[in-house]
Amino acid sequence: MKPNESLFSQPDNKIPVFVLLVSVYDDAGKEKECLKSLDELKKLAETSIDDDGHYSVFFCLTQCRKSPDTATFIGRGKADEAKKLCSGNNISLVIADGEMSPSQIKNLEDALNTEDSEIKVIDRTMLILDIFAKHAVTGEGKIQVEIAQLKYTAPRLTGRGINLSRQGGTSGSIGARGPGETKLETDKRHIQRRILSLKNELAELEKERAVKRAKRQKSGIPTVAITGYTNAGKSTLLNYLTNAGILAEDKLFATLDTTVRRLTLPSSREILLTDTVGFINNLPHGLVEAFKSTLDEVVYADVLLIVIDISDEDAKLKLEVTEKTLEELGASGKPTVYAFNKSDLVGFEDTNTFPSDVYGVSISAETGKGVDKLLEILDMVLSASKKRIKLLIPFGDSSAVNYLYRNAVVESAEYTENGTLVTALVSDKEIGACKKYII
Ligand SMILES: Nc1nc2c(ncn2[C@@H]2O[C@H](COP(=O)(O)OP(=O)(O)OP(=O)(O)O)[C@@H](O)[C@H]2O)c(=O)[nH]1
Ligand SMILES: [Mg+2]
């Protein structure tokens, strides 16, 4: 997307929302990077505005300066330019590609508005939180988003622009979800109390999730977590494999809630496949924190299945973001299989540009091409990977203990009244050899 370019989405008799995207980059060499990021911001805004039943018309302004203006994010001169652009084009929403302080939001709104305009300013994090609020379905998801919104969005809501689309008198509502108008008017103490009570509710739900997870772990069925950048095709893949019926669409953060499905691999091995929230560059820190329990599904998985949209020219960059996020979550270092998805869009032979030492396969979750191979690879990786088990070995069978010391990774061994209590990391073969002692 080029500066000042206006893009028109499909009208479909919907009412337009005119949006100005603004961005500041600190080095002339970073202009391309800045425009790419604006493209992603546009996609986020489209997702949110489309969810409100409107369509979006975009304008954009970029500025190269050392750092964002402390008062108005873009510099004063740029703000004047933005004001003219807004009034000449019916713009009711300005979105900054970065994080803004509450005072920057207020100051920029003041700089852009005249007496009879109601231009609302939000930043990238508020936009992402808004999408999360719209897409959260389960109680847990909704609580997680509300906590993140109370912490980030509430202090930034200025009260302006709850009805962001003046055009046609409709009521778009970016930034109005979750904490909402009434909480906006309440004081900080009330917000703190609400956060506390939500955290308590969440803690209860986390306990339930932990019990379910413990059950799954006890069942010995390995868990494979489908993960990757948002819109890579994770849900489409789970749907293809298990008819899970999850909403999969060309929107960012279509999935927020976790789905777990059972799947039988070619070797007849059963696995549990989970689909959960995707990642994005600069995922707001508060969201990662708030979605900790959901993201724990990835942390506790036995194997990661990273889905990459190979048709995307930024596939490599998005894989880097995914791997960095996994590392931050403490989920890296697991056996990992890479599914280079959407290969139907680029042709199978064009997709082998990744290193040969990764377990990777080109697939199309849409057509099913390559998926059989993917399952074979998963089978192979699972039989090679080790699981943590606990065994109680009677004192009479010291050979079983010796076998484990020789073949597996014994993490602890403790003498109890009834025998030796061993915790060990074992492969399928070793499990077979001492199955009767597993507790
Ligand atoms: N052509 C093509 N499109 C695909 C393929 N897989 C997924 N898509 C499309 O890509 C878009 C995103 O797919 P999703 O399955 O919702 O992606 P996701 O990774 O679950 O995305 P989030 O839930 O938003 O993180 C949808 O429009 C899918 O139809 C594929 O193999 N080929
Ligand atoms: Mg999804």
Image (cartoon, rainbow, N blue to C red):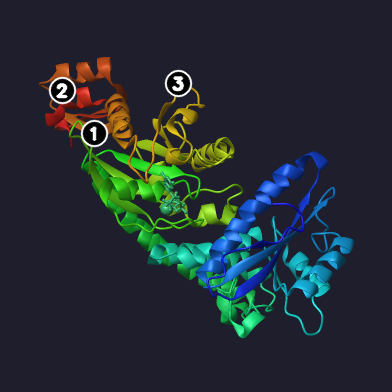
Q: Which residue is mark 1?
A: 390
Amino acid type shown at disc 3? Asp
Q: Which residue is mark 3?
A: 357
What's the residue at 31%, 44% (across, down)? 273
Q: Which residue is mark 2?
A: 433
- 217 shown above or below 22: above
Residue 349 screen position, x and y as percent:
45, 28
Quadrant in the picture for the C terminus: top left
Q: Amino acid at mark 1?
A: Lys
* Residue 220 figure quarter: top left
The residue sitting at 21% across, 16% down in the picture is 402
Expressed as whole percent of the image width and height from the top left, the position of residue 387 reads 29, 31
Pointer 3 or 2: first along the chain: 3
Q: Amino acid at mark 2?
A: Ala
Of labels 1 and 3, earlier in sequence is: 3
Q: Quick one: SS at disc 2?
A: helix
